[in-house]
Amino acid sequence: MKQSKGSHSWSILTGKEKRCFVTGRTSCLQKHHIFHGNGKRKISDRHGFWCYLVPEVHLAGLGGLHAYPESGLDRALKCICQREYEKTHTREEFIDLIGKNYILLDLEEAVQRKAEMESMVERKGMENYKAYAMEKYGKMPVNDCWTCEYESQFVEEMDLCIHGEVAGFWMM
């Protein structure tokens, strides 16, 4: 019998490949349900919202992602999973299924905000942009860079802006 997408043996992140999503290791693997609780484990199994992880990346007792729910790697996996799902479905379908949107900022939106920021800072200065951003978006972006803000959805910490043209100009 052929196993289909969205089964217990197919992951939206790695397909049928049996390897740790983070380290790439192929031994001592544990199945991590990206969404769990309130019936979401069954949804995760049905739609392939899971991946293999090695114990030190997975288990709370070893400092893995279950030690820090809803942050760091856990948040990144949810965001990446949603992005994969949205390649063939709508955001509304994902929210109907899981109950929440985990993508806080799309790359296209980050690029638009960056252009808006550059234009406004050039015309009116950084202080005026800060006031505008606080009023419109409720915050300034990570490292004063909207690209960093977008990428912060996928990584735990971003101490510096790595976007050369932005780093020297926007960093205070």
Image (tube, rainbow, N blue to C red):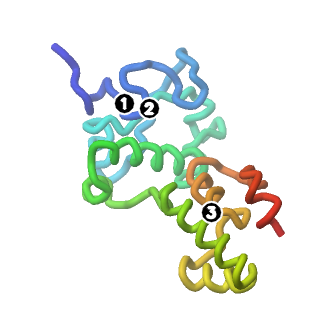
Q: Does residue 122 sit above or below 170 in this rendering?
A: below
Find disc 3 in the rendering and name its residue: 146
Q: Residues within 10 Å of mark 1 (few under 14, many from 20)?
A: many
Residue 68 in the image: state x and y as whole percent: 59, 50
The secondary element bearing badge 1 is classed as loop
Residue found farthest to the left: 1
Q: Amino acid at mark 2?
A: Cys
Residue nearest the observer in this picture, 129 or 66:
129
Ranked by sequence position, the earlier of labels 3 and 1 is: 1
- Tell me the mark number nearer the camera, choosing from 3 and 2: 3
Q: Indicate which disc residue 51 carries.
A: 2
- Image quadrant containing the C terminus: bottom right
Q: Does residue 48 sit above or below 131 in this rendering?
A: above
Q: Residues within 10 Å of mark 2 (few under 14, many from 20)?
A: many
Q: Amino acid at mark 3?
A: Trp
Find disc 1 in the rendering and name its residue: 11
Q: How far is the residue under mark 1 from the one under mark 2? A: 6 Å
Ranked by sequence position, the earlier of labels 3 and 2 is: 2
Residue nearest the observer in this picture, 134 or 114:
114
Residue sitting at 47 percent across and 49 percent down?
Answer: 79
C-beta proximity under 8 Å, tags 1 and 2: yes
Q: Amino acid at mark 1?
A: Ser
